[in-house]
Image (cartoon, rainbow, N blue to C red):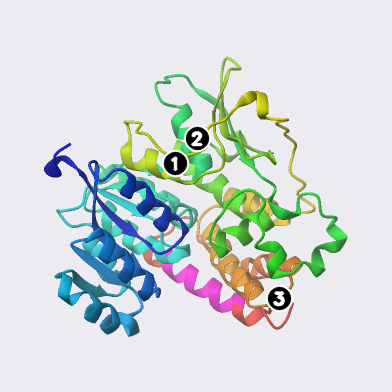
Amino acid sequence: MSREDRRRIAILGSTGSIGTQALDVISQHPDMFQVEMLSAGSNAELLIQQAKQFNPNAVVICNKERYQEVKDALDPLDIKVFAGVESAGELAGGSNVDIVLAAMVGFSGLAPTISAIKKGKIIALANKETLVAAGSIISKLSAEYNAPIIPVDSEHSAIFQSLQGERTQIEKLLLTASGGPFRYTDISEFENITVEQALNHPNWNMGAKVTIDSATMMNKGLEIMEAAWLFNVPVEKIEVVVHPQSIVHSMVQFVDGSIKAQLGYPDMRVPIQYALSYPVRISLNTKRISFPELKELTFSAPDLNKFPCLRIAYDCFKRGGNIPCAMNGANEVAVDAFLNKKIRFSQIPQLIEKTIEKITFIPVCTLDEIFETDRLSKVYAKELLCKI
């Protein structure tokens, strides 16, 4: 593939877990991909290293206090340096970009993703909070600006792959969940769970926020909402199945009872690469399955009493409007508080529920109302921290 034919990639969140793995994928296929833009939150050191290796046209450091540090380091390389989240959105929508990998953590990824959608870019979506908080708005914008959304989450990528070539009605989506590090832990021990224990995921190597969400199973709750918007399926037709081995990444059941699934060892580079190379499959140096070596593949229903965050997510999506956005904002505060040892693991769902109770329900939201709901939910959650 010539330089002119390479896919030009902008990465929103290049220093996070998804961003760094995406750059590993890109480094294996320099004939197919060209990095055009990198953005990071505050990790200036890593952003500088990445820029020196991949030589993008521009980089954005969202933390404006670290702008000069990045600019001074990259000036000799003639790489343009910008600061602020607004710059990330504007550059991702530039004419020199084909695909935007939306991998910023949390609600902060919403505005830049919207900017890229409005420029008609292909969105490789790893930021699930974008659809959780503003699914209706994002879906309409994607259709209006002809900006296809290709999922990067392993579960949604599995469903997306299983639907290729199908014209049959979906009967059910089966989202698999590892169950996190506490699937075998008695609920009586949840109050004493440490941050270190919660960050010790048995199967996946992820960032801190996503890892804690996996431990509470809120991650699966967010994925239910994301799946409903991505595949236009009512939440009643989305079932979570605990699959500790994380080999089956999710399944689709069709109206004739047939089920299709995508399997593979846990490796986020697989769905990342599929989103960037779609509809073409290209080689990847990942571990291959040997079925004779697989001892067992087991499946069970999730325990909603033990993991109330999953129940909360189901309930919030059914309520609709701005409530999923409020839940997401409260969860971000709760996870951060737990990581900083301000609350116990068992108090995460309590803080989320108490915050949602304080939010005024808006059934049909504008984008401004979504941003205001996110702001208020975080204000309320922080106020409640000392009261739970």
Q: Residue at x 69, y 68 (%)?
A: 196
Sequence order check, earlier mark of 1 and 2: 2
Determine whether, in the image, residue 65 is placed left or right of residue 317: left
Determine whether, in the image, residue 337 is placed left or right of residue 151: right
Q: Residue at x 50, y 54 (%)?
A: 132
Query: What residue span does the magenta drawing correspond to?
Result: 370-381
- Closer mark to the observer between disc 3 and disc 1: 1
Q: Quadrant of residue 7?
A: top left
The majority secondary structure of the magenta stretch comes to helix
Measure how far apart labels 3 and 1 are at the Cα level: 34 Å
Quick one: quadrant of the N terminus? top left
Q: How many numbered callouts?
A: 3
Residue position for label 3: 343
Measure how far apart labels 1 and 2 are at the Cα level: 8 Å
Residue position for label 1: 271
Sequence order check, earlier mark of 3 and 1: 1
Q: Residues within 10 Å of mark 2 (few under 14, many from 20)?
A: many
Q: Are marks 1 and 2 in contact (CB under 8 Å)?
A: yes
| Disc 3 residue type (three-letter) | Ile
